Amino acid sequence: MQKRPTERQASIVELVRADGFKTIEQLAERFQVTPQTIRRDVNALCDEGLLRRRHGGVEPALEHENIAYRARKVLHVNEKRKIAALVARAIPDGASLFFSIGTTPELVASALLQHRGLRIFTNNLNVAYVAATNDSFDVTLIGGRLRNRDRDVLGPEVEAFFNSYKVDYGIFGVGGIDADGSLLDFDEQEVRARSAILTNSRQTYLVADHTKFGRNAVVRGGSVTQVTAFFTDCPPPAAITQMIEKNGVALHIPEPNAEFPTFYVPEED
């Protein structure tokens, strides 16, 4: 049975990132589709900034900027759902939360929909949209400059807003985690907003799947050693593990073959 195009495209990205280069013919054989179908997929992925064309095939794109939301949404979704389910287990009813931008925080919001009485503040349009489906939630969407490509809001207004409140939990993702533990992102305003979340949350929860380890991004802001807890889908590199253990950071990883409840994820129109 052939995969839906979005699933196949996500798998293409994974293969190319793992191997560094794939020809059109190799991809067509791997997915049992025609070269023409693979070319259409590749064209779409290159347009989204996920891959880069090279003679005879494709290679990973240079990561000077983040991948667009529509493309990130289908990458590692199963891993992100497991992370989200773990976070939901750690949040009590009636808590107040900051949510950052990103697709993993969005899935955390989805995993929390069975909770009651949460108060949520976010600059993530998708988090606000998901959380608004629970009538018991009090949701505040922060104003600022709308980034259509990423479906979020940034700007000095966002940083000022986060600095005006003190909440129980800050839920945030990152663009990458450097080998020295630095938290990296692609935009200075993203980092400033995240820093405000870190400063003004009683407990800070970093949510990031395994692909963020060693991923390049140009703006540094904070360290993995500064968070209360780190939720990820597989053990971090040894150096990162040593850092978080030394600094008392709680590490949460799903048990192998653990079963998690399914939860609502809004579909694209």
Image (spheres, grey):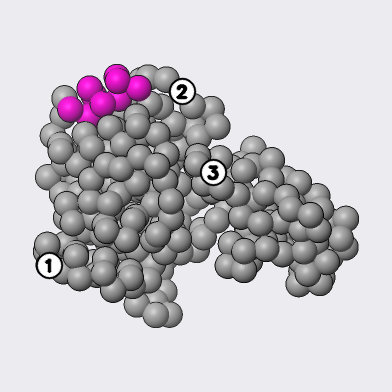
State the image coordinates of residue 89 (x, y, percent, origin top left): 27, 61
Q: Is 120 situated left or right of 167 in this image?
A: right
State the image coordinates of residue 260 (x, y, percent, origin top left): 41, 68
CA distance separating discs 1 and 2 = 39 Å
CA distance separating discs 1 and 3 = 33 Å
Picture layout, residue 113 above or below residue 82: above
Amino acid type of the residue that numbered disc 3 sits on in the rendered structure:
Ile
Q: Is label 3 in a helix, a strand or a loop? A: loop
As drawn, the label of residue 246 is: 1
Picture layout, residue 232 above or below residue 51: below
Quadrant of the rendered structure where residue 168 is?
Answer: top left
Does the magenta stretch mainly form a helix, a strand or a loop? Answer: helix
Residue identified by numbered label 2: 146
Q: What is the span of residues highlighted in magenta in the rendered image? A: 155-163
Query: Is 109 in front, or is 253?
Result: 253
Q: Looking at the image, is mark 1 or mark 3 earlier in the sequence? A: 3
Amino acid type of the residue that numbered disc 2 sits on in the rendered structure:
Leu
Kindly identify the residue that appears in the image at 23 percent across and 24 percent down: 161
Query: Is 237 in front, or is 115?
Result: 237
Q: Is 136 situated left or right of 148 in this image?
A: left
Q: Is label 1 in a helix, a strand or a loop? A: helix
Picture layout, residue 101 above or below residue 88: above
Query: Is 155 in front, or is 202?
Result: 155
Count of numbered labels shown in the rendering: 3
Q: Looking at the image, is mark 2 or mark 3 earlier in the sequence? A: 3
Question: Dot 1, crowdedness within 10 Å: few (<14), some or many (≥20)?
Answer: few
Query: From where the camera sits, is residue 163 visible?
Result: yes
Residue identified by numbered label 3: 67
Kindly identify the residue that appears in the image at 24 percent across and 55 percent down: 224
Nearer the camera: disc 2 or disc 3? 3
Amino acid type of the residue that numbered disc 1 sits on in the rendered structure:
Lys
